[in-house]
Amino acid sequence: MLVAKAVRKTYGGIVALEDLNLTVESGSTLCLLGANGAGKSTTMNLFLGFTSPDSGSIEVDGLSPSRTPEAARRKLSYIPENVSLYPALSGLENLRFFDQLSGHQRSDGELTEILVSSGLIRSQVLQPVAQYSKGMKQKVGLAIAFAKGAKALLLDEPLSGLDPKASSEFTGRLRQFQETGCAVLMATHDIFRAKECASTIGIMRAGQLVELLDASQVDAQEIERIYLKHMREDSAI
Amino acid sequence: MMGALLQKEFLEYRRDRRLWLLGVLLFLLLSAASLDGWNRFQADASARASAVEVDRKVWVEQGDNNPHGAAHFSRYAFRPLPVLSAFDPGVFDFAGAAFWMEAHTQNPTSLRRVEDVVVHAPFSSLSPAWVVLVAGSLLVATVLFSSVSRERENGTLKALAASGLSARDFVVGKMGAPTVLIFLLVVLAMTIALGPLLLTKFNPEPTAIRVLMLLVLYFCVLLSFSFAVLWISACARSSGEAFNLSALLWIFFALASPLLAGQLATTIFPDIDEQSLRNEIQLKAQTPFWVGSAGDDAKAAQERAVEEEFGVSDFDSLGFDREALVLQAHEEFANKVYDELYGELQARHRNQDSVQRYMSVLSPLLAAQRISAGIAGTDLLAQWDFADSAEQHRREIIELLNRDMMIHGADKGFSYMADRSLWESIPDYQTSAPSLKEVVRYYFIELSAVCVWLVVMAYLAFRALKTSLVRGQ
Amino acid sequence: MFRLHLRRQWQAYWSEKRSLISLGLYIFLALWALAGGINWHLQMINVVSKPPADMITDRDTWLADLERVESGETVSAYAARPMAMTFLAVQAPSSLASLAYRHESIHPHATLINGWRNESTLFRRYEVQGASALRAGQLDLAFLVTVIFPLILIILCFDIVTREKESGRLRLYLSQGGSVVELVFARLFVVVTPLMVVPMLCVLAAALAFSAPFGHVLIWLSAMFVYALFWCGVVACVALWSNRSTSAALGSFVVWALIAVLLPSTVQFSAQALYPLPSRVSFLSEARDAEAATRRNLDQRAEAYMAEHPDLVVSTDSAVPAYYRAAYLANIDVNNHTAPLIRAAEEQRSSQRRFVKAVGFLSPALVVQGGIEAASGTGVMYSAAFRRQARSFLNHLLNEIGPATVNASRISSSKARKIPEFIFEPPRVPLGAYFGLVWVGCLGLFLLIIAKRKASHVS
C-alpha cells in the first residue's frame, strides 16, 4: 500500500533522507522511531505529496503523490501531532465538513455515532472545538480518518502530549483501523506504545532507516536497547 | 467538495464576531449616511427649485429698466442636482452651486457647501458612497486577512490538503466565499444607501442604469480588494504579518492615496490664487478696453458685423444706439480674455484631476471613488459642464439685452427702458448632466484600472492559494 | 534595570527594518508638511499684502479727491463718491498657521468692502480652487500628528508583549526577575521619542521663521505631548490585554480607525444632520428677492429712507447717476432681509460647535486637532470670525455712507478719515477651549496607570 524506494531528499544541501526503502502492507502498522530531525516527518510529507523526492520513488496504492497528489491523498488519512480543526465549528461540524470533502454524505446521526465510537462523549459532540482538550481533538481526528475510510493512515507523533489514559485509548482505537485492513504508518517517540500497536518497527537515524524489527519478535526493553544503541552511534557521528 | 468548503467558510463567517461587529457598525453608519444624504438631497433640491423660481420671478418682475441695468441686475444659474448626489456627493460640496451671469465679467461658480462645516474631519465626510467603499473595504480586510494564514497556523491547511481536496476546489471555495459575501454586502449596502431613492418617484431610465453601474463598480472594487487581501493572507508568514500588510494596503488604498493624489496635484499644478485671477481680469479684460485703445478693433469689428447683418454701410444710418454696440463690443473683447483666463484655470483643474487619475491607477479604491462620482453626476466633469454652459448662457442673454438696447435704445442710451416683454423673452438657464457615454469616456483609465486590478488580483490570489494547498502550508 | 531596557530597546529600534522605514517615512512626511505649510504661508502673505487691481480707487487717492472737492476744485462727478470708498479686508495668516492649514483654502482670506457690496456678494469671487484637490485637503503637520503619528506608533509597538509571549521568551524573562512594566514602557519611550522630536523641531522651525508667540508654541507642544500620552496608553493596554499578535494588531488598528477616522467623520456628519444650516441657495434667493423689491419701488424706498433721516435735504446734483442710490438701498435692504437667515445660521453654527465640543470628547484626535488649530490661528473659528468682522465692517460702512449716497452728495473728509481701516481681530480663545487637552492628558494617564497595573500581573 505505502512504498518508498531508494528515496533521497535534501533541503538546501542538508540531507533529510538517504536511500529510504520501506513498505507498509494493508492491515499492517509500521512505527517509525527516531530522534528529532531523523527524517520521520519528511517521510510523512513525501507520502502526502507536500514535498517531492530528489531521487527514488514514493507510491500510495500504486500512485505517485508528487505526480498526482490529489489522487494519492484521497487514499490517505492523516493525523498530525496536533489535530487541526476549525475552532469556531463543533466536533460534529468539523467531521461533517471533512466527511463531505472525502465525498461522503452521512447524516448527523451517523457522524455522531462515529465520533462517539472514536471516544468522544455524546454531549461534547456539539461543543465548539475551541473548548476541546488535545485528547478530544485527537479523537475527532481519528473519527475524521475513520469516516474517510482511506486505505492508508499516516500518523505524525499522534501520542505526543497525551496523558497515559488518552494514549491508551488512542492506541485502542488505532487497532480498529488495522482490523479494517488499513495500512498504518506512524511516527512516534513512544517506544512502549509503538510496541503495543505496530506490526513492524523501524528506527531512523540521520535520514536513513537503520533497523527494521518485527514487533512480535522483540519486547519493549529490547527495542529501547537497540534504539539507544543507534542514537549513541548518531551522537558519535 | 467545493460546496462543503463554501458551506464551511460561511459557517465560519457566521460565527466570526468581527464580521458581526463591523457589519453592525457598517449598517448603522450606512443607514445614518443614507438618511442624511436623502434629507440633504431633498432640502437642496427644494432650495434649488425655489431659488430658480425666485430668480425667474425677480427677473421678470423687475419692472421697467434699462437693458444694461438689467444685465447688471442679471440672473443666477443654479447647478442641477442629480438624484444620485444623495448617494455620492462627489466634489459638489467643494464646488460652487451657483453662477452669477452679470454683464462684463465672467465669475467663477460660487456657494460651496463645505464652507458651512464647523469641524473638518481628517478624511472625507460620511456619505453612503464613502461608507460602502471605505468602511466596506475595512470590513473585508478585517474578515479576510486570516483566511489562509490562520488555516496555515492552525494546521487545517495541511489537513485540507491531506484530505485530497483539489486545488481547483480549494481556490474556488476560498475565492467564491468572499465573492458571495461581497455581493451580498454590496447589494445590502446599496439597498440601504439607495433605499430612499428607490422608494420615491424619479426618472427611472437613466438612473436605473446608473444604479446598476454603481452596483457593479462597488462589487468589482471590493472584490479586487478582497482578492488582494486573500493573496496577502496566502503569502504572509503569519496572521500578524497578513494583518499588517492588509491594514497598510487598506490605509494606502482608502485613505492615503486620495490625500497623496490631492497633495501631488496641487504641488505639481498649484491653484491660481483668486487675486491673481481678479487682477488679470482687470488688467486684460477691463482697463485696456475702457481706458486704453485696445478695444478699438473690437468696436470696429462689432460695427462691421451689425452693418453686415442689416445690409448697410454706415452704422449711424441705422439709428441704433452706439453705447449698446460698445457694450457688446466689450463683451466680445472680454470673452476672448475670459476664454483664455478661465481656460487656463480649467486646464489647471484638469491637470490636477489628471494627477488624481494617474494616481488612481495605483489604488482601485481611489479609481472607484472617482468613477462613482462620475456615475452619480457629482464629479468635476459635471461641475465644468455646469460652469461652461452657464457662461455660454450668460453670453447669450447679455447679447440679447445689448441687442435690444442697440436696436430700440436709439438716442436714449442708458435712459432707454425696456419692459416685461423683454425680460420674458430671455430664456431660462437649462442644462443636462454629462451622459453616461461621456462619463465612461472620461473615466476610461479609471475603469480600466479597476478591471486590471480585479484580473491581476484574482490571478495572484489564485496562484498563491493553489501553491499554499499543494505545499500544504 | 529600566536603563538596561532602554538601552536594549534603543539598539533594537535602530536595527529593526520596520522602525527605520517607518521613521524615514515619517520624517519625509513631516518635512513635506512643513515645506508645504511655509510655502502656503508665504503665498498668503503675498496675497493679503497687495491691494487687488480692481480696487478701483485706493484710499489716499479717494481722500485727496475729496479734499480737492472741499477746497472748491473741479473734479469728476464720479470722484470721491462715498460708494467708491473701498477697504481691503484681509485675514493675514497667524504665525503658526503653516502648521495647520489643511482646510484653509476653503475659506476666504481677503475681500474688498465698499458700498457696492452686500452680505450676499461680499465673498462672491474667491472660489477658484480645484474642487477635487480641495476635497483631498493638504498634508499639514496637524494631520501628521493627529492621524499618522498614532498609526506609526501602533505599527511599531502593537506586539510589545505578544511577541514575547508567542516566542515563549516572556516566561523566561519573568523567571529571571524581569518586569513587564519596564519592558512595555521602555519600548514606548524609545519609539515615541523620535516620533515626537520630529514634529517638535518642525514646530520650532515654523515658530522661529514667523516669530510665533511662546504661548502658542507651548500649547502646540502640549497638545502633541498629551496626544502621545493617550496613544501610548491605548497601545500599552491593547498590547497587554491581547494574547496573540493578531488580536493586538487588530485591536489597536480598530481603535485607531475609530478615533482618527470614523468618529471625527461621524461627529462632523451628526452635527450637520442635527443642526442643519439654512441653505446658501435660499440665502441667495432671499437676497435677490429683497434687491428686486427695492429696485421696483425705488422712489418709495428712497422716500422712506429720507423719512428715517429727517436731517437730510434733497440734493440737486444731477451728475450723480441714479444707480448709486439704487444699489445702496438695495444693498441695505438685502442685508436687512437676510439678517434673520444669517442669525439662524449663526445659531445653528453655535449649536453645531457646542455639539462637536460635547461629543468630540469621544475622539481625542478631534480634541487635539481643535487645540492645535486654536494655537495655530486657523480653522473654522478663525474664518468665521473673519467673515463676521467683514460683515460687521460692511454694515458700519453702509451706515456711514448711507445719507450721503441717498442724498447724492459726498461725506466730509473728516468723517471719512474717522472710518478706520479694517483690521482683523483674531477671536479670543477662552482658556476653557483647552480643557479638552487636559481631558486627553488625563485619559492618557488613566490608560497608562491601568496598563501598569495589568503589566504587573502578566504571566
Image (cartoon, rainbow, N blue to C red):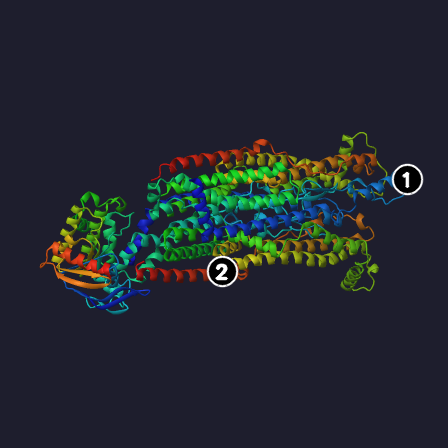
Answer yes or no: do the residues labelled 1 and 2 have beta carbons within 8 Å? Answer: no
Q: Is mark 2 on a helix, strand or loop?
A: helix
On whether disc 1 and disc 2 are found on a single subunit, the reply is: no
In which quadrant will I find the N terminus of chain C?
A: top left
Which residue is under mark 2?
B447
In which quadrant will I find the C terminus of chain C?
A: top left
Which percent across, then down, holds residue A75? 21, 62
Residue at (66, 39) in percent of width and height: C386
Q: Nearer the viewer, residue A127 or B156?
A: B156
Label 1 chain ID: C
Q: Is residue C143 visible?
A: no
Which percent across, then down, holds residue C210? 66, 44
User: How many other residues sit within 10 Å of disc 2, few (<14), some (14-19) or many (≥20)?
Assistant: many
Q: Is residue C265 found left or right of C66 in the rendered image?
A: left
- Label 1, label 2: how far apart the Cα atoms are: 73 Å
Q: Which of B336 and A225 is in front in this view?
A: A225
Residue type, label 1: Gly
Q: Is residue A126 found left or right of B45 in the rendered image?
A: left
Label 2 chain ID: B
Considering only vertical position in the picture, is C18 above or below C404? below
Which residue is under mark 1?
C72
Q: In which quarter of the image is residue B293?
A: bottom right
Residue type, label 2: Leu
User: How many other residues sit within 10 Å of disc 1, few (<14), some (14-19) or many (≥20)?
Assistant: few
